[in-house]
Image (spheres, grey):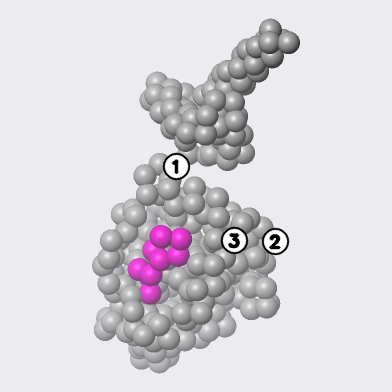
């Protein structure tokens, strides 16, 4: 499905003291980069706001004059797109994920689809729109009011028929945004919870290293456990490093990266178990001889 993405990153962040909100980090990753990671398949990604470093290339633009509000910013971003479907996101969504984006795109019949938060409110800045409908209604509003400056998004969405997409149990926080210091602290605490921290850490590391490979966390942790218990504790990180290196070599030769990791993990785990069995057999033999 061909789509473009427009990310609004030019707000004043008044409740955060006017700081550059999209650059604030959650899990050591900028909020904007976390949003960009949720839509890697966009044909063109336009960020409306001041230029700043990003994890992947984007196209930059600004509304004229700057500070004209979300509708003016959306119009500026829309001018940089050509796809029939446009994903519109705010830049402060730390828990937005790819499956949620895909659900929005799949549901964008009629004029589009918007994410419905747990309180039953539709979120116009977590939505997929038909570009033709957006351009039509924005043009009508500009003619009616003489300018888009200061107009709220609800002036636009009130005229559109949007399919609601409810957040799933797996991603109940997909619509959570960071407007205040309390929101930011809550997001940072959430990713460090026991059930989330490993997935968040693995995603952060992959982004930092510029790799995108499916990782079977359970398999690698089982391998680390076998190496630590069957060989020596320092063998755990060293073994997983070697597995990664071997998988990278296999992938460079044309193997599927995920399958390469799984195969290297299996071989190393079998080796660790044989190593442990040999040690146990020697220990048993020594005990028998001493008796």
For the record, the magenta segment spans 21-30
Q: Position of residue 101 (x, y in %)?
A: 55, 58
Residue 233 position (above or below residue 67) = above
How far apart are labels 1 and 3 at the CA level? Answer: 24 Å
Q: Can residue 69 be seen from the camera position used here?
A: no
The stretch drawn in magenta includes residue 197: no
- In terms of secondary structure, where does tag 2 sit? loop
Residue at the (30%, 78%) spot, across then down: 63
Q: Position of residue 188 (x, y in %)?
A: 50, 67
Side (left or right) of 153 relative to 171: left
| 152 or 97: nearer the viewer | 97
Residue 205 position (above or below residue 83) = above
Q: Position of residue 55 (x, y in %)?
A: 34, 55
What is the crowding at mark 3: few (fewer than 14 residues within 10 Å), some, or many (at least 20)? few
- In terms of secondary structure, where does tag 3 sit? loop
Residue bearing mark 3 = 193
Residue bearing mark 2 = 169
Q: Position of residue 139 (x, y in %)?
A: 41, 80
Residue bearing mark 1 = 212
């Amino acid at each position: 499905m061909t789509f473009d993405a427009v990310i609004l990153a030019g707000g004043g962040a008044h409740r955060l003291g006017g700081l550059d909100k999209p650059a604030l980090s959650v899990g050591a990753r900028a909020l904007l980069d976390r949003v960009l990671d949720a839509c890697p398949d966009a044909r063109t990604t336009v960020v409306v706001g001041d230029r700043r470093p990003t994890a992947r290339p984007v196209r930059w633009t600004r509304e004229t004059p700057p500070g004209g509000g979300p509708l003016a910013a959306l119009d500026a971003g829309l001018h940089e797109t050509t796809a029939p479907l446009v994903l519109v996101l705010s830049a402060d969504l730390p828990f937005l994920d790819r499956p949620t984006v895909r659900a929005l795109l799949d549901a964008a019949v009629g004029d589009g689809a918007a994410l419905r938060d747990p309180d039953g409110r539709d979120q116009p800045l977590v939505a997929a729109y038909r570009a033709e409908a957006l351009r039509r209604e924005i043009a009508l509003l500009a003619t009616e009011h003489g300018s888009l400056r200061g107009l709220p998004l609800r002036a636009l969405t009130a005229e559109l028929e949007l399919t609601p997409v409810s957040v799933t149990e797996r991603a109940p926080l997909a619509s959570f945004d960071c407007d205040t210091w309390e929101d930011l602290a809550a997001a940072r605490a959430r990713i460090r919870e026991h059930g989330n921290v490993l997935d968040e850490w693995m995603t952060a590391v992959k982004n930092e290293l510029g790799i995108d490979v499916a990782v079977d966390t359970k398999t690698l942790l089982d391998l680390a456990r076998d190496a630590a218990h069957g060989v020596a504790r320092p063998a755990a990180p060293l073994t997983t490093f070697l597995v990664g290196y071997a998988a990278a070599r296999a992938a460079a030769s044309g193997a599927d990266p995920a399958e390469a990791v799984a195969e290297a993990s299996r071989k190393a785990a079998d080796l660790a178990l044989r190593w442990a069995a040999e040690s146990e057999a020697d220990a048993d033999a020594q005990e028998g001889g001493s008796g």
